[in-house]
Structures are given as C-alpha cells and as structure tokens.
Image: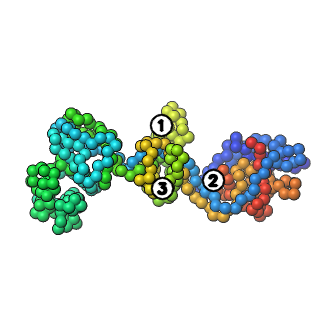
Amino acid sequence: MRKRGKWLLGTLAVVLAASGGGYAVMAQPQQESGQEQRGSGLPPATAPVQRGDLSSGLQVEGTLGYAQERKVNSAGPGVLTWVAGEGAAVERDGKLYEVNGKPVRLMYGSTPMYRPLKAGDKGDDVKQLKRNLQALGHGTGLDPEDGTFTAGTATAVKRWQKAHKVPETGEVAKEDIAFASGPQRVKKNDSAVGDEPGPGKPVMTLTGTERVVRFQMDAAKAGAAKTGEPVTVRLPGGTTVTGKIDSVGGTAGPDEKGEGGGGPGGGDKKAKVEVVVALDKPAEVNAPDQSPVSVGLTGETRKGVLSVPVNALLALTGGGFGVQVVEDGRAREVKVELGMFGNGRVEVTGDALKEGMQVGIPKL
C-alpha cells in the first residue's frame, strides 16, 4: 500500500525563510495522514482553494506618541520663575519658560539659537528670525531669503519687543528665543520653578504636536518596513486608523520587551531598529500618550493567486509538498509549488489545482 503524505500541523516547526523573494518551508512530519483521517480515507475537514490577493503583512506592537522629541536647555544662568505645564501646546511666539522673570519664546526654524542676533550678522538663523517676524506681522518689507541682519530687521525686532512691552533694543539675545520645527508640546518638565538650571542644563522635553506611532523591529527583519508604505493602526478601544511609515531609523539597541513580549531576562538581546509611523489624520486620534497600539504592515502583495490554508500542506514521502484534493467522495494527493505566505495561507501552484477545489485539512 502506498504511504500517504504527512500533515504539517500547527505544532510543527514551519519556518518561512525569505531569500531573494522566494520562500521555503521546513518541517518534521508528526503523524501519518491515515491517523488523522476518517475511516473512509477522507480527511476530517476541508477548505476551498481560493483565488485572490495575498499579503505577507504582519502585526507588530507599538506605542502612540508625539513627533520629534527634543530637550530644551537653559540659555543662561538664573532662577526658573515660570515654566509651561506638562501637556501644554506652545505655538510661535508663545512662552516656554521664564528665567529671572524674562520669557524665552518659541520661534520656528531648524537652526538652534546659538548666538545673540544683531545688526550685521549673517546666516540661516537670521533668515529664520526674519520669517518669524514676518509671520507675526512685524517684518513687513523684509526679505526672508536675505541672511543679513539689516536696519529693517532691527526695526522689525523693535516692533516685536514693543508688542511684548520689553526694552526696544533692536537686538535679540541668545536667551530670548528657542527655535523648533513647529508648534511644540511639553512632554516633561526637567526643571521646576525655583531651580537654577544653568547654561546647557535641560529645562524641559518637547515634542511636536502631531501624533505618531513608534515601534521596534529586529534589525534583521527591518526590510519588511519601507518608508512611504501604508499601514493600519489599531488603537485602544478597537478603532482602526491609517498611516504611512515615516522613517526607519538606525539601530536602537536591544529592546527589554522584545518582539513577542519577552520581558527582561528573556534572553532577547537582538539589535532593534525604530520605525516611526505618521498618521493620515493625527488630529482625530485622542488616545493618551504612550498608549499601546497594534500596527499592521502591508508587506508584499500578490494579485490574483491561488492559496490554501497553511495547515492543508502535506510533506510528500517522495519529497516536496502537496495538498489532498477531495472530489466525488475521494481524496487524492496533488503536488504543489509554494509561493508567498501570509495571514495563515500560502500561495500554491500546480497543474491539477483549480479555484474552488476542496483540500483536506487536519481537525485541530
């Protein structure tokens, strides 16, 4: 009597290895199919061969947060007399904190405030200052592409100072302004009122105001996340929102929790890569900061392929893989070639295989 193939049960080691776009399955047979079948020789259950799109996407656990975290250091000596509260949103010209009663105001720009600005100075920081003065209505007539601190710039600075009822010097001290990329949210106060943080000491931790999602992947698997690819994010409560991968960062070091939920001491010391997801409608996300979320990566998609449940596969005694096709009350083995795996299914090709056919699966 011819030996039948052997079921690849979920308890077996089914290993998906992607190499050059191809996939392989390795398994050790567990039981003869006859032990799983009914007395009639038919399998205990069947499932249809389906034609459709198959995705190799995967689910990873992430955290809801805010964009572009950064520290704000004190620009000079003195006592901290006021600081914006944690969770506060600060926009252009808004106060971040005060030292000795003198406000430090937020302006937009990528170059940090590293020097006082006065007549004759040149550079990108001068351009930034001009753009902010224009946006606030004080810099009419200024050329924001001219990086020179002109007499007109000094006049605009005086208007800005007059609006805040401070001495109209026409110069901007280093401790007057902190530049950031846009509106900021106070994530944490690193110093309290009454402290003397001193030059270069952190006063607060800021983030952008837009919601983002961060997660980590093993560095070896980071190729599954590509910048610009769409993702779905499941929020606390079950709501699903969409987004795109904004960045796939450098190595982030070992993750204490690791993929799969292993805690400290679990031996997971693999290097991690941080991935940031920009949400399509961040303003509509109201979940608390640091909420756990689930991120669905799209991965590769094959269009219009035949697929069967992974547990329908048989390890054929003569080598290779097959499925057990059930027709007219009989079962026969059909050898198949395997393609992409995804969502519990596997792409299969074979001359004798057609959409709608029933294939045997073990009764789990």
**Viewed as shown, does residue 5 lie left or right of 147?**
right
Mark 3 in CB contact with mark 2 (< 8 angstroms): no
> Where's residue 114, x and y in %?
20, 50
Q: Residue 243 carries which label?
A: 3
Q: Is residue 135 left or right of residue 261?
A: left
Q: Where is residue 119 in the image (x, y as percent from the top left)?
A: 11, 59
Quickly name the residue at label 1: 256
Q: Residue 342 shows which numbered tag?
A: 2
Q: Which of 297 and 64 is in front in this view?
A: 64
Q: Residues within 10 Å of mark 3 (few under 14, many from 20)?
A: many
The x and y percentages for residue 137 are 20, 61
Mark 1 or 2, nearer chain start: 1
- Of tags 1 and 3, the one toward the viewer is 3
Is residue 51 visible to us here? yes
Mark 3 and mark 2 lie on one chain; the one further toward the N terminus is 3
Is any atom of residue 249 visible in this view? no
Residue at figure coordinates x 87%, y 54% from the top left: 330
Looking at the rendered structure, the kind of residue marked 3 is: Gly
Q: Which of marks 1 and 3 is nearer the N terminus?
A: 3
Tell me: 72 left or right of 210: left
Separation (CA) of disc 1 from disc 2: 28 Å
